Amino acid sequence: MPLNIAIVGATGAVGAEMLTILAERLFPAGEVHALASRKSMGRELSYGDKTLKVKDADTFDYSTVDLVLMSAGGDVSRAMAPKIAAAGALVIDNSSAWRMDPDVPLVVPEVNPDTLGQRPKKAIIANPNCSTIQTVVALKPIHDLAGIVRASVATYQSVSGAGKEGMDELWTQTRGIFVNDEVSPEHFPKQIAFNIIPKIDDFMEDGATKEEWKMMVETKKILDPKIRLFATCVRVPVFVGHCVAAHLELERPLSAARARSVLREAPGLMVIDRADDDDPQFITPVESVGEFATFVSRIRTDPTVENGLALWIAADNLRKGAALNAVQIAEVCLNAGWLKGR
């Protein structure tokens, strides 16, 4: 039986991408509802060959749907997700609100689908942080084969990770610089055009940012609590596409050639890697946009640590880093047999 679905936050970049991916992957949907704040009511959004009119998320009757995909921010999710679940719908939430709740599965389908063998206690499933998702997809096959002791990662995160406001600010500043307008940062703490900012989210007491903390604790919850991970998260002047430079210390030796071979066979990954000046092959954010895969390039032995390995990881943060992962979670639930239309 087709599932009736609601998208909360449908007018945002991730919400719109959720509608696109549901259509692209031919998800068995019955009625699909685009929901947002009252000020967006009546706005039209595309869903495949259909046009949906946005409805008010606050007054919508959630007892009429089986599945709710949420991308409306942590405050909204904390307030609404339990009420939606109580109405009978399964909630897949893209915010950070529920990720570390012990009763809420934190899921990347290529990594830990076994956590979805039955309906979660709270009927809420959390989508991990965008950079965490692509990182653990690439680390999972390596960890299974050689055991990751420690990972030191640096992220290069596009402005779309900060939403429409971030994308607008990059565009406005870039255009303004060319006509000698004064740059006035509003959404980001410093100029983002032609610059990079080593701060995403708020600083914590130990000097790390919340984004860096998220990568650490989420990787442990999804992949293995014994892995030690240190992150530096950086905002870069790119519209879409996140990248991660990962330096790994392994329990057992693993050559770059063997790692390359294993990663090529892993689900959700595409290896594009050849160090040849005549025909170099590696992925940048531009090539990742619009793709479902997580890409891995620059696979190298790191001789500075015992059993060291380095990877360059790239993905479309609006797709695999958010909307695609949420839809894939729904597909796992559907295939497990417990997510059914009413």
Image (spheres, rainbow, N blue to C red):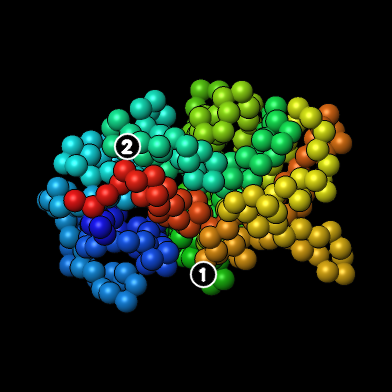
How busy is the neighbourhood of tag 2: few (under 14 within 10 Å), some, or many (20 plus)? Answer: some
Spatial CA span between label 2 and label 1: 49 Å
Q: Is mark 2 on a helix, strand or loop?
A: loop
Q: Residue at x 16, y 48 (%)?
A: 62
The front one of 206 and 48 is: 48
270 vs 207, left or right, is: right
How busy is the neighbourhood of tag 1: few (under 14 within 10 Å), some, or many (20 plus)? Answer: few
Task: Pick out the residue farthest to the bottom.
Answer: 49
Q: What amino acid type should be assigned to the residue bearing mark 1?
A: Arg
Q: Position of residue 19 (x, y in %)?
A: 35, 63
Q: Which mark, residue 119?
A: 2
Q: Which residue is drawn at 48% across and 57% down?
A: 319
Can residue 296 be seen from the camera position used here? Answer: no
Among the two numbered marks 2 and 1 on one chain, the one whose residue lies closer to the N terminus: 2
Q: Position of residue 141 (x, y in %)?
A: 66, 42
Q: Is mark 1 on a helix, strand or loop?
A: helix
Can residue 115 be seen from the camera position used here? Answer: yes
Residue that carries the numbered disc 1 in the rendered image: 175
